[in-house]
Structure formats: structure tokens, C-alpha cells
């Protein structure tokens, strides 16, 4: 599963998982968007 996530991030966003994680940590809006998207999967 980890490889699938890494491949998705690199192909979709063109960055490494480390850069993607740094962006999520530094941006409250991106963090909120991801939380909202995750919540929608469970509803």
C-alpha cells in the first residue's frame, strides 16, 4: 500500500512523498482539504 501511495503522489503531483508531507504540514488549507476528503469517504 505504501508503494501505491508513493507512486500516486509522484505521478499526480510530481513531487516526492517527503515534499508532499511538508506541504500538508505547512498549509492549514491543504490539511483541512485532506481531512474533508477523507471524511467524505466514510459518510
Image: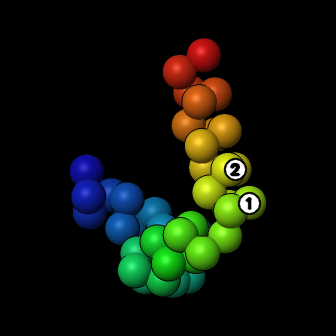
Q: Secondary structure beneath disc 2?
A: helix
Residue in the image at 67% along x and 50% along y: 32
Residue in the image at 40% along x and 80% along y: 18
- Label 2 – label 1 distance at C-alpha: 6 Å
Q: Quadrant of residue 31?
A: bottom right
Q: How many marks?
A: 2
Tell me: 16 left or right of 34: left
Q: Is residue 18 above or below residue 8?
A: below
Q: Quadrant of residue 14?
A: bottom right
Tell me: 7 left or right of 10: left
Residue in the image at 56% along x and 37% along y: 38
Can residue 10 be seen?
no
Q: Which mark is residue 33?
A: 2
Residue in the image at 36% along x and 67% along y: 6
Q: Quadrant of residue 13?
A: bottom right
Q: Which residue is mark 1?
A: 29
Q: Is residue 36 above or below residue 7?
A: above
Amino acid at each position: 500500500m505504501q508503494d501505491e501511495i508513493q507512486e500516486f503522489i509522484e505521478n499526480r503531483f510530481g513531487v516526492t512523498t517527503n515534499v508532499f508531507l511538508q506541504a500538508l504540514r505547512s498549509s492549514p488549507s491543504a490539511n483541512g482539504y485532506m481531512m474533508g476528503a477523507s471524511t467524505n469517504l466514510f459518510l
